[in-house]
Image (cartoon, grey):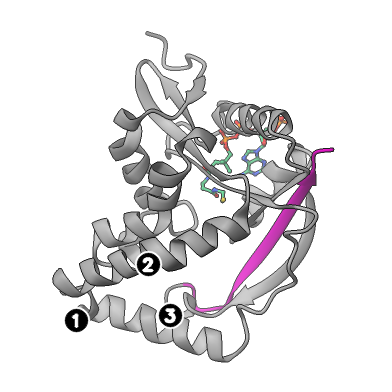
Amino acid sequence: MPAEANAVIRKFKDSDREAVRQITFDTAFLGRPASVFFSGREVLCDSLTLYFTDYEPQSCFVAEINGEVIGCLLGARDKAAAEKIAGRKINPKILWRALREGVFFRRKNLVFIFKSFFSILRGEFRMPDFSAGYPAALHINVKDGYRGRRAGSGLIGAYLVYLKEEGVIGVQLATFSAAAGQFFLRQGFELLHTGRRSYFNHLLQKDAPLYIYGKKLL
Ligand SMILES: CC(C)(COP(=O)(O)OP(=O)(O)OC[C@H]1O[C@@H](n2cnc3c(N)ncnc32)[C@H](O)[C@@H]1OP(=O)(O)O)[C@@H](O)C(=O)NCCC(=O)NCCS
């Protein structure tokens, strides 16, 4: 098969679960592996993907090249409702798993947890609530080596069609990547808000800028 074959975009299936977890883990730190800041793959994958793959799989899409899943979009039609489910049903399970697997005793994780705690104390998590105009949310990741081949735009396109069919009025997302911001602007999103997060500054030697983008659908 030619290396430049186009990606096929399709709905997520249960059998994609492991591939989606791996891609999410491998791209979680500004497009690079989460192992840079966290030790404990299953706990991290649970916290980033479990809601989407287990509670709202119908809002998820994958990009496939030559039968391999090379990108995914994890969506939620109602971000606020998803966060409630995460808080009530998913986070307690993740906490229990983290305790069982000794995740809290690893140095890298302790640094990240303490830094996140100070980030909360500094008010870095206080942000405007865009859920009235932009109720849906998304996370999108394409594997390194397959970027720039229109898998990302295909995934966004499929998700936006789906959201419109579902009568959803708008969608938002957060990213640390200014480069990804250019991608979202090209997909018709607008910048809604910028903030800063300090919990990676031991790795980046500076605060990470956080960008919130949104797109109205109706
Ligand atoms: C951001 C990302 C999803 C884009 O997917 P992709 O498959 O590489 O993008 P596409 O090939 O569909 O590009 C579509 C358009 O966006 C532009 N674009 C894509 N990535 C870009 C980047 N990093 N900087 C500037 N423009 C970019 C392309 O040039 C293209 O422009 P065109 O329509 O004018 O030709 C992918 O690069 C990625 O997963 N990056 C790492 C993780 C990440 O940052 N995720 C987003 C946070 S939620």
Secondary structure of the magenta portion, mostly?
A: strand
Asked whether 206 falls inside the magenta stretch, the response is yes
What element does badge 1 sit on? Answer: helix
Instruction: Name the residue type under label 2.
Output: Asn
- Binning the other alpha carbons within 10 Å of mark 3 as few (below 14), some (14 to 19) or many (20 upward) gives few
Determine the image quadrant of residue 36.
bottom left
Place of residue 82 in the rendered image (x, y in percent of width and height, measured from the top left)? 53, 56
Q: Which contiguous range is marked in magenta? A: 204-218
Q: Quadrant of the N terminus?
A: top left
**SS state under label 3:** helix
Q: Tell whether circle 1 marks a residue whose Cβ is less than 8 angstroms from ligand 1.
A: no
Ligand 1 in which quarter: top right
- The answer to whether the residues at label 2 and label 1 have Cβ atoms under 8 Å apart is no
Residue with the mark numbered 3: 202
- Mark 1 — residue? 105
Reading the image, the residue beneath label 2 is 91
Q: Report the residue that reaches farthest toward the right.
A: 218
Distance (Cα) linking label 3 and label 1: 19 Å
Q: Which of marks 3 and 1 is in front?
A: 1
**In this view of the protein, which residue sits in the foreground, 5 or 162?**
162
Tell me the CA gap for discs 2 and 3: 26 Å
Question: Can residue 177 be seen here?
Answer: no
**Marks 2 and 1, the one that precedes in the sequence:** 2
